[in-house]
Structures are given as structure tokens and as C-alpha cells.
Amino acid sequence: MTRKVLVTGGAGFVGSNLTEFFMGKGDNVVIYDNLSRPGGGAKVNIKYLLEKYKSNPSLSFVEADIGDFGKLSEAMKDADIVLHVAAQTAMTTSLEDPVGDFETNARGTFNVLEAARRADNNPIVVYTSTNKVYGELTKKAIELEEKEKRWDFAADEFKKGVDEDYPLDYEGPYGCSKGIGDAYCLDYARTFGLRTVVFRMSGIYGTSQHPTEDQAWVAWFIRQAMENKPITIYGDGKQVRDILFIPDLVDMFDRVITGIDKAKGKVYNIGGGRENAISVLELLDLMESELGIKPSQVTFDSWRRADQKVYISNTGRANREFGWEPKVTKEDGIRKLYEWMKKG
């Protein structure tokens, strides 16, 4: 059966990959995007998508903001699936413009949920939240240990990473705005019976990602090195994130949609896990040894607010319930991203 899939932020990094995946499955896909992505990546992606599928009537594009409830509701009409990936994505931007951050992430997500609640056919709604809802991991003590090129969790309890039961701590405007959407998604499932699923994501990277200094750090470092430009590291460079190559994230979308009766009303931590954790310094080493590139200069500056020294996702729930696990190693993923970026 052909489904109607609405992708908010469908011209962005995650959204464009979802668009291509569901087009490949024969679905009717509606991209809903205001093309405001800093750096212009959404405009590049939408041009590519509209050209690729120009003779395919299954793809349509609505240029609009999720703040426009009327246009959003119209686009959602008869939708079977709503993939809500439109967002303001940078902590730095939220500090500079907390009102705009709230309107996009909090109000915008509320609009998506209200439109879904009022829709006739109870669409599946998958929302991309963030590991930032856990704050700086201070709500429950986590002892850290400093190693030569990375920070790490010292306690065995957290060796596999942070799971969904860790206490929330919406720190900074970005953490708050994404956390509001996170909470509303789960509550709309409980209160109104919506079929919502929340992904608390960590370090997603890959093709169709157009980086800025504030967002998409792996791709940003690679691009700066490719162009022989300098890099500024905020902090000591030992901060660690688990990174996940985009097809593995898309795979989890597909699994929860197929198994929505099991997934609805639940939250899943989605990242690369310990096997794909990497520090900033380790990434620089890997770029030089495996890709043969390095920035022209590396300088250090003070830590950014709410920048966790270590965050690693415990993805055990996704594995237990859906058999999901990352398939692409960080080494292979970084090389694939590099090869894509070389094509320009």
C-alpha cells in the first residue's frame, strides 16, 4: 500500500536522507521546509531532490514554516506518517536567539502534534530529540576519567553509555526547547493516544550534511581540513561523542514505523554507541592517518556552555525491541562522508 509521508525539514540533512529512503520504498513524500538552514544546505538539497525526482509525481514540496499551523495542517492532510525533523539545531544559536529557538523547536513541535491530533487518520509521528535533554549529566553522579586523548565514563554502570532512564536536565535554551517537544510527544501518546515515537539522537553525520562551525562537527572538521583552513577547538579536545552514520538512523526510522504498535509512546536513545565513540583529538588523528588531511592550524578556546565532556548513547532498548544496532563503523562512515564531500 502506498503511504503518504510528510517530512518536516525534509530538505535538511536528516530530512533529505529520509525523503530519498521513503521515495525508494514507493511512498508519496511531501517535503515541508522553509529552507532557512544556516549555511544554505537545505537549498542545495532541495535543488538536488527536485531535480532527481522531477518526473516522479510521488514527491511534492511545500515551502513553509512549521509555525504556520494552517499550511502545516493542510500538508498533513491524509498523511499516514509524519517524520518531524525540522528544528533549530545549535546550542550557540539558542543562546543568541532564545525566542527564535523556542518558536521553532517548542512551538513548532507543538503545532505538529496538534495538527496530528486533529487529523482524521491518526498518523504516526516520529520526533528527533537530542542527547542535550540530559544536560551535562549531573543529575545522577557519573565519575569521569581523563585519558591521553579522551574523557571517559569511569563507572561500570555507564560503560555502555547513557540509557533512557537517566534523569532529564533541560540545560540551555536548546535543551529546553527540544525537551519541551520531547515531553509533549510522549504526553500526546499517553493523553490523546497519538502514535508518537521519540529519538534522542547523538552525533548523526553523513551525506547531504552541509556543516557550519556550530553544527555537524565531524563534517565541519573534514571540510576545514580539505580546504586547508584552521580549526578552533572549544575545550580541551578530549570531549567524546558517539557518532552514527545516517543510513543507520534511517534504518531505525523504518523499524519503528513498521513496529509502531510496540514503539508508540516510547523514547529511544539513538547513536553510535561505545564502539563508535570518538573524541575531537581522535578525529583529527584519524583524518590525518586515514584520509591524509589536516587543518592548517588548530587553536583552543574556552568550553562552550552545556558541552558534555562525554556523551555515549546506550542503545540497548532499540536493540532489545527492534534488533537495531549500528552497521557502519566510524572509520568507514568518516571515509564515506569524506568521499562524498570531495565530489563537491
Image (cartoon, rainbow, N blue to C red):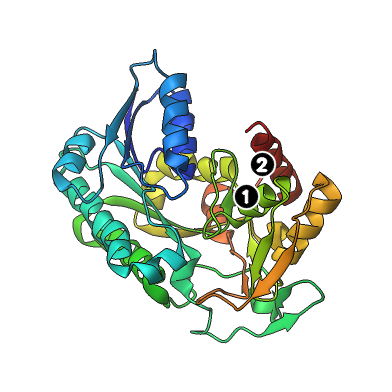
Type of the residue with mark 2:
Leu
**At 43% from the left edge and 58% from the top edge, which residue is drawn?**
89
- In the rendered view, would you say 151 is above or below 181? below
**At 17% from the left edge and 40% from the top edge, which residue is drawn?**
71
Please give the residue where the numbered disc 2 appears in the rendered image.
Answer: 337
Task: Estimate the x, y position of residue 179 in percent, counting from the top left.
Answer: 36, 67
**At 29% from the left edge and 64% from the top edge, which residue is drawn?**
102
Please give the residue where the numbered disc 1 appears in the rendered image.
Answer: 219
Task: Estimate the x, y position of residue 54 in percent, counting from the top left.
Answer: 39, 17
Upstream in sequence: badge 2 or badge 1: 1
Nearer-the-camera pick, 29 or 64: 64
| 317 left or right, relative to 160 | left
**At 47% from the left edge and 30% from the top edge, which residue is drawn?**
20
| 90 left or right, relative to 4 | right
Question: Mark 2 touching mark 1, by CB under 8 A?
Answer: yes
Alpha-carbon distance for marks 2 and 1?
Answer: 7 Å
Task: Estimate the x, y position of residue 92 in percent, counting from the top left.
Answer: 46, 67
Q: Within the image, what quadrant is residue 82 found in?
A: top left
Secondary structure of the residue carrying numbered label 1? helix
Secondary structure of the residue carrying numbered label 2? helix
Residue 299 visible to the viewer: yes
